[in-house]
Image (spheres, helix red, strand yellow):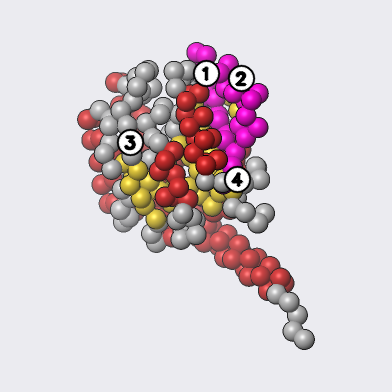
Amino acid sequence: MDQDSVTVVIPVYNEEECIQKVVTDWSGEITKHNIRYQILVINDGSTDQTGKILDELQSTKNELLVIHQKNQGHGAAVKNGYIQAINQNCNYIFQTDSDDQFTPKDFLALWDMRKSSPAVFGHRKNRFDPTHRKVISFFLRKFIASLFNVNIPDANIPYRLFEKSFLSHLLATLTPGLFAPNVFLSILSFKSLGNCAVLPVSHFERKGTEAKLIRWGLIKACFKSFKDVVTFSYQINKKLSYIRDSQKVIELHRSVKTQDSKPLAA
């Protein structure tokens, strides 16, 4: 694979009002920059017209792959999207959400940083979310910093780019059932790399249907996430050791391939 390419992973649940626009906007933006790409949408058991709209789009867009699954929740859809993307041919994986709160126009800035780090993250510079969500994110950031000694501006942001082999090793360390896998992928990335490229990205007010996690559901999700983070802190050293050993194998393999490709001396 000579040209870098990207699979864009988009989990979706009941977004009939905007999913066509989201897919079309991403397709148009990446095409404009002559990047080879695929859009992989995980339909997490939508009960509205989302699945039908996606199937119709897939019939007209060669770059679109739609996977329908039973409803398992956003985190499971994200993780399944990553796993499915690893099995595709593209060598980079980008994840975003389907609610049209982000713009594809910020993608190129992250894409241009891909050689500087195997993980590149956005952070919402002006976050258009309800106050309670901002407060939760603030305390999560402080909590992660105290447990793992890393400052991650936006640990759960759905706007992130991974080199495929690096992401594959991160995923191999995640235990099943994590409510917010992106949080743990962020922690592993920052801890294993020492630092990651982080760029500000635009964030817009949600239109149409309200956010899926509200009131009591959001409270329960928060408790689950914070509990998962505490448990994860006891396992982090073993996970980091695995990731670093895996990266050493990759670098050795790349070094051997580079040496093999050099012309023999006369």
Label 2 to label 3, Cα distance in Å?
Answer: 28 Å
Q: Residues within 10 Å of mark 1 (few under 14, many from 20)?
A: many
N-terminal label among 2 and 4: 4
**Gap in angstroms between the C-alphas marked 3 and 4:** 26 Å
Left or right of 154, for residue 120: right
- The image shows residue 106 at horizontal and vertical percentages of 40, 43
Residue 100 image offset from top left, x and y in percent:
40, 29
Q: Which residue is mark 3?
A: 203
Tell me if 71 is positioned left or right of 56 in this view: left
Which residue type carries mark 2? Glu
Residue count near mark 3 (Cα–Cα under 10 Å), binned few <14, some 14–19, many ≥20: some
Q: Residue at label 1?
A: 50
Q: Is residue 213 left or right of residue 53?
A: left
Residue 12 in view, yes or no: yes
Q: Which sits in the foreground, 249 or 157?
A: 157
92 or 32, which is in the foreground?
Answer: 32
Residue 222, given in percent of the width and then of the height, sits at 33, 32
Amino acid type at mark 3: His
For marks 2 and 1, the one nearer the N-term is: 1
Marks 3 and 1, how far apart in space?
23 Å
Residue drawn at (28%, 43%) of the image:
125
Q: CA distance from mark 1 to mark 4?
A: 26 Å
Question: Which residue is pictured at 65% across the width and 23% down the height?
Answer: 59
Q: Which residue is mark 2?
A: 56
